[in-house]
């Protein structure tokens, strides 16, 4: 079975999480697969630039998540992050926005994002 590593930032401001709408019409945190020779942190920073057109400052790894789809296991690494610029939609996403926990509960979230939202809510983050 092939293992695919994915990394991305978790950005929360004013009790709202930043999510992007992808081509599959799911809301998710910015994230993407590691490229050859790239570290998890480098991938998270690159995905921020590609998806939300902003640099981020990364802090601790706050959550990992694994899922298996069609003989591939995706290991997703989520880093707490702070925006260093004003976000806007990049080429890979349809829309970005800020959402409260209650708004997230009504949205079609990716499995990882659903997991992250519940984890952070239980921790009192938002």
Image: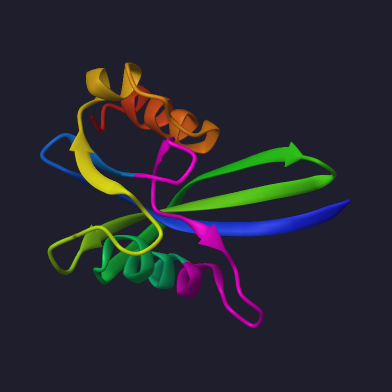
Q: Position of residue 19 (x, y in %)?
A: 31, 43
* Residue 50, percent from left and from top: 37, 68
Q: Is residue 73 magenta?
A: no
Give the percent coordinates (x, y) of residue 110: 49, 34
The quadrant in which residue 113 appears is top left
Q: Quadrant of residue 90?
A: bottom left
Residue shown at the point (68%, 48%) measured from the top left: 74
Picture coordinates of residue 115 (x, y %)? 49, 30
Q: Nearer the viewer, residue 119 or 73?
A: 73
Residue 125 position (above or below residue 18)? above
For the rendered model, the colour scheme is rainbow
User: What is the magenta segment's predominant secondary structure?
Assistant: loop
Relative side of 119 to 14, left or right: right
Q: Is residue 96 left or right of residue 71?
A: left
In this view, 5 is above or below 78: below
- Give the position of the C terminus as an image quadrant: top left
Query: In the rendered image of this protein, does residue 69 appear above or below residue 79?
Result: above
| Viewer-proximal residue among 35 and 65 | 35
Q: How many marks?
A: 0
**Residue, x 25% and y 33% (percent of image)?**
125
Q: What is the residue that sits farthest to the right in this orientation?
A: 1
Locate residue 4: give its quadrant: bottom right
Of all residues, the one furthest to the bottom in this rendering is 37
Q: Residue at x 43, y 36 (%)?
A: 25
Magenta segment boundaries in residue numbering: 21-43
Query: Magenta stretch containing residue 22, yes or no?
Result: yes
Left or right relative to 1: residue 41: left
**In this rendering, position of residue 15 left or right of residue 94:** left
């Amino acid at each position: 079975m092939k293992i695919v590593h994915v990394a991305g930032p978790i950005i929360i401001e004013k009790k709202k999480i930043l999510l992007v709408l992808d081509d599959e019409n799911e809301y998710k945190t910015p994230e993407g697969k590691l490229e050859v020779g790239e570290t998890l942190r480098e991938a998270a920073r690159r995905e921020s630039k590609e998806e939300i057109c902003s640099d981020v400052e990364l802090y601790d790894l706050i959550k990992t998540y694994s899922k298996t789809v069609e003989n591939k296991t995706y290991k997703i690494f989520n880093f707490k992050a702070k925006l260093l610029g004003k976000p806007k939609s990049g080429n890979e996403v349809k829309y970005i926005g800020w959402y409260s926990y209650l708004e997230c509960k009504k949205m079609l979230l990716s499995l990882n994002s659903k997991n992250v939202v519940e984890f952070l809510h239980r921790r009192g983050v938002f």
